[in-house]
Amino acid sequence: MEKFIVSARKYRPQNFSTVVGQAHITTTLKNAIINNQLAHAFLFTGPRGVGKTTCARILAKTINCENQTKEGEACNTCQSCVSFDAGSSMNIHELDAASNNSVDDIRSLVDQVRFAPQAGKYKVYIVDEVHMLSTSAFNAFLKTLEEPPPFVIFILATTEKHKILPTILSRCQIFDFKRITNADTVLHLQEICDKEDIKAEKTALHIIAQKSEGCMRDSLSILDKIVSFTNGQLTYSNTLEHLNILDEDYYFKLLHFMQNQQLADALLLFDEINAKGFEGDTFLEGYAEFIRNVLVSRDARAAILLQVADDFKEKYVEAAQKVNVAWLVAALNSLNETEINYKQARNKRLHIEFAIIKLTHLSQAIELTTENGELVKKKTNGSN
């Protein structure tokens, strides 16, 4: 039986051109290689799972490639590239600073730095999670980091740049990686699905992208799990079920009931949501984000801020035209207060039901009027 390889490893980029969502960094690195302007120390910083270690490995492979392309990419066919891909190259050394953070570990690394590579131009040292090094380890590293031998390049990677000593930062060329956008994530997931003959609805891939919050590694892990769960048939509904995410149609229904002051229907709908096993804080957070999306959708220019599948954008725009802006703003404020006080509430269900009652009667409880050119709140005793 062929051994299963997780997608995050199987589809790890092998060239700068295949790195997703970090064009500002890959372009700079390729130009540095082409113009022979490589720094002796780099710091790759950014959220987890966005390509820091991947770019470090690609850089290490490319600068040792025997047949670099004119675009500054590795050929992937020479002996050096083949050994890099096979994990047998002696020119790349990876150190996990989370478990090797003592001064002795760094002194051992410094001792290795003195020896020239047996083959290739450069020895590359990748120090992952470098912020975990102790202060004494940082200090032992300083001199070597500032003036390494000409054949050595250091690449430090971290998710928490603020924890690194300024003296270390000043000796590195810093590259800030950004979160990968949902659009880029969906596109990459679709490419993988096409290669693996996986049938996936675009809305399902969009849900995965939202859940991963800009982390490509997480999105690929989620994809692998759902493929196993659904036997290669990804739909919007089974993706929601697997990720335990509430269908947005529930929020649209709840908004409709609240706008029409159908309190019984709103409470029964929440009971149905609660019966599905969704915690109260998850519901509050999801509904607040939903109301925010409706508010944003009122202006076509701001609709690009929606991080939802294309199929839902029209529904949001349609719903936004039926709801008063004042109600949306007041609802967001009320949901925020409810969420803040949720942990302290003894009867959490009643706490949320009270919030639903307030939102259902919000339009008749507060009337926004203009007096002398200013917007003021006026409480009313009856309906509008």
Image (cartoon, rainbow, N blue to C red):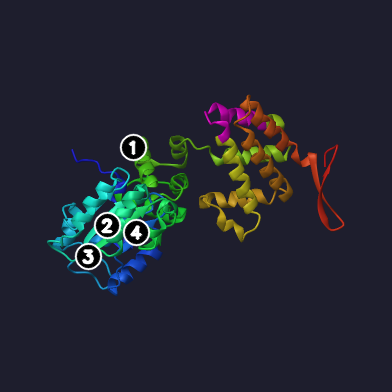
The amino acid type found where label 1 is placed reads: Ser
Q: Nearer the viewer, residue 145 or 118?
A: 145
Label 3 and label 1: CA atoms lie apart by 49 Å
Label 4 and label 1: CA atoms lie apart by 26 Å
Task: Name which residue lies at 52% across and 53% down.
Answer: 310
Q: Secondary structure at mark 4?
A: loop
Label 3 and label 4: CA atoms lie apart by 29 Å
Label 4 and label 2: CA atoms lie apart by 12 Å
Q: Nearer the viewer, mark 3 or mark 4?
A: 3
Give the mark nearest the N terminus, 2 or 3.
Answer: 2
Label 2 and label 3: CA atoms lie apart by 20 Å
Q: Which residue is mark 3?
A: 149
Q: Nearer the viewer, mark 4 or mark 1?
A: 4
Q: Nearer the viewer, residue 189 or 198?
A: 189
Q: Which quarter shows the N terminus?
A: top left
Q: Secondary structure at mark 1?
A: helix
Give the mark nearest the N terminus, 4 or 1.
Answer: 4
The answer to whether mark 1 and mark 2 are in CB contact below 8 A is no
The image quadrant of residue 139 is bottom left
Give the mark nearest the N terminus, 3 or 1.
Answer: 3
Q: Which residue is mark 4?
A: 19
**Magenta stretch in the rendered image:** 266-281
Q: Which residue is mark 2?
A: 57
Image x and y of residue 67, in percent: 18, 69
Image x and y of residue 116, in percent: 15, 62
Tell me which secondary structure the magenta stretch mostly adopts.
Answer: helix
The amino acid type found where label 3 is placed reads: Pro
Q: Nearer the viewer, mark 1 or mark 2?
A: 2
Q: Nearer the viewer, residue 199 or 291?
A: 291
Q: Which residue is mark 1?
A: 228
